[in-house]
Image (spheres, rainbow, N blue to C red):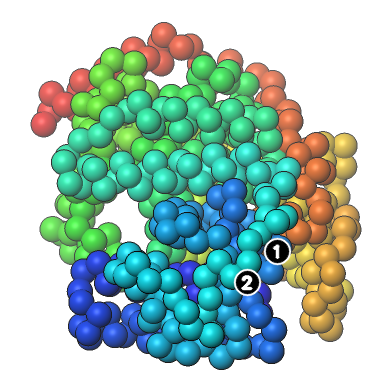
Amino acid sequence: MNESNVQEFLKSLQAVLGQLNLYPANHPNSQTALHRGWEASCRLADSDEDVVIGLKGYAYFLNGELLAYTSLMYANLYHDLAAREIETITLAGATDATDYRAFVRYVGSHTEDFPTGQSIRVNESRLTDGEDESAFADLRFSYSGVVGTLRTLDHRVAREGSFEMGPVMQAVEELIDQALNASGAALLLSTVKSHDEYTFYHSVNTCLMAVATGQYLGLTHKDLVPIGAGAMLHDIGKVAISSQVLNHPGRLDREQWKEVTIHPQEGAQAIVAAGGPGHEIAATIALEHHARFDGLGYPRLGTDAVPHLASRLVAVSDVYDAITTRRSYRRAETPHRALQILLQGAGGAFDPDIVKTFISLMGIFPPGSVLRLLSGELVVISHHRADSEELQAVMVSTAAGESIEPELVAVSVDQVAQQILAESVGIEPATLLEQAGVAEQILASSAPRVDEGAIERSGIDEEALKDQATRSLSSIFERD
């Protein structure tokens, strides 16, 4: 039994609830979802001991142990369970299919009767110690809140064609405040991936990395808030693209590609309509994040036009996170490979100074990277120390492939044989490193070194940047 079993149980439960909101229980789709959910509950409860999933303080617990990654991934479901005043779910031995069905009906508010089955019991016991006391708790709470804000915004835009900037800016400011105080933890948290809700988690991860890079460049909190907002909303225009096109597994045809290329304008117009004056930079980021440094992307900005500095900043983080995330039509690449792709695109697709800054910030093997050493052991990079060239890591398996209790180690680059995908060996870096007890060290490493001279090289000037953003938006809107 491990955290992945809990995630499978919660994911299946979420799917069942969604189906029962669309179809009656006897519909084939509902029946299929119920059967898969019951099977997931059986796999979770495959032991002689009771399995207790607890909910408290916006976090999930498995037999009293915090499930940090799961708490982020299934925050939306948490609210549904909490609304039914569910504090614990106990699975006792082999799950009975009838008990599972009764449990789902109760959670989905299809009945007010409490499940009385013997194999699944609700609120049999109360949590006494369930609190998220991790050093990352506040940052994780803000991350979860922003994902929730994006879900709400996405649904509203899809339904009404508009949204309000106020809640977005509040959520972004809270996240940025936490991220600036703990940028090492924020970079680690940006390794959280969701294949089912890619757009939401991708947007938050892009925001975290763009803000960390901007902080490294020496930008102030005042500068970073609109950049963070633009990073969060850079893909909001994708609500105008059909899901069939977004998740198309092969090469897009001409009409499909045309549909994709309108999302920057759609996003920029939505932000301008929602926020009005004062949100030009956020709107410009949405408009230009695919424009490329050399101007050969989309939309075309005009002769000799260069994307806004904020757009160039977000474009690097956007592509890095996209490359390192598995999609329905493409496998994930390792963080090291993603950095290589950015470096290859420097001067063409990407601003070379920002690529250099981003790589300096992330390191040759970014936090959360899973490495196989020449001697065979498996380690996970935890953080970087300014006073050491060695990689700070946690060893998780021996050369013989045997799992061990996480052990703090420092390794040199020449000891590394290869980098491998975390999911290929069942590792969730953020969770593992928290459980390994290195949170305090990661937080202590979080103050970034400002890249001296970066501001001068980039020509950052607040009023000039705002004017450039306004001109960029005007030129596009006049063309429509």
Residue 419: mark: none
Residue picked out by circle 1 = 64
Q: Examine the rendered structure and indicate whether residue 100 appears above or below residue 336.
A: below
Crowding at mark 2 (Cα within 10 Å: few <14, some 14-19, many 20+) = many
Residue plotted at (79% across, 81% down):
401
Task: Tell me how many marks there are.
Answer: 2
112 left or right of 244?
Answer: right
Q: Examine the rendered structure and indicate whether residue 207 appears above or below residue 345.
A: above
Residue plotted at (55% across, 60% down):
87
Q: Indicate the position of residue 463 as horizontal and vertical percent values.
A: 41, 8
Image quadrant occupied by the C terminus: top left
Task: Using the image as rendered, state which of residue 76 and residue 402 is in the foreground.
Answer: 76
Element type where label 2 sits in the image: strand
Amino acid type, mark 2: Val
Q: Which of marks 2 and 1 is nearer the N terminus?
A: 2
Crowding at mark 1 (Cα within 10 Å: few <14, some 14-19, many 20+) = some
Task: Using the image as rendered, state which of residue 335 and residue 180 is in the foreground.
Answer: 180
Residue picked out by circle 2 = 52
Q: Picture quarter containing residue 453?
A: top right
Q: Examine the rendered structure and indicate whether residue 140 appears above or below residue 328.
A: above
Residue 160: in sight, yes or no? yes
Q: Examine the rendered structure and indicate whether residue 40 appears above or below residue 383.
A: below
Q: Picture quarter containing residue 246?
A: bottom left
Q: Indicate the position of residue 434 as horizontal and vertical percent values.
A: 73, 54
Residue plotted at (34% across, 21% down):
279
Q: Indicate the position of residue 57 as horizontal and vertical percent values.
A: 59, 48
Marks 2 and 1 close (CB-CB < 8 Å)? yes
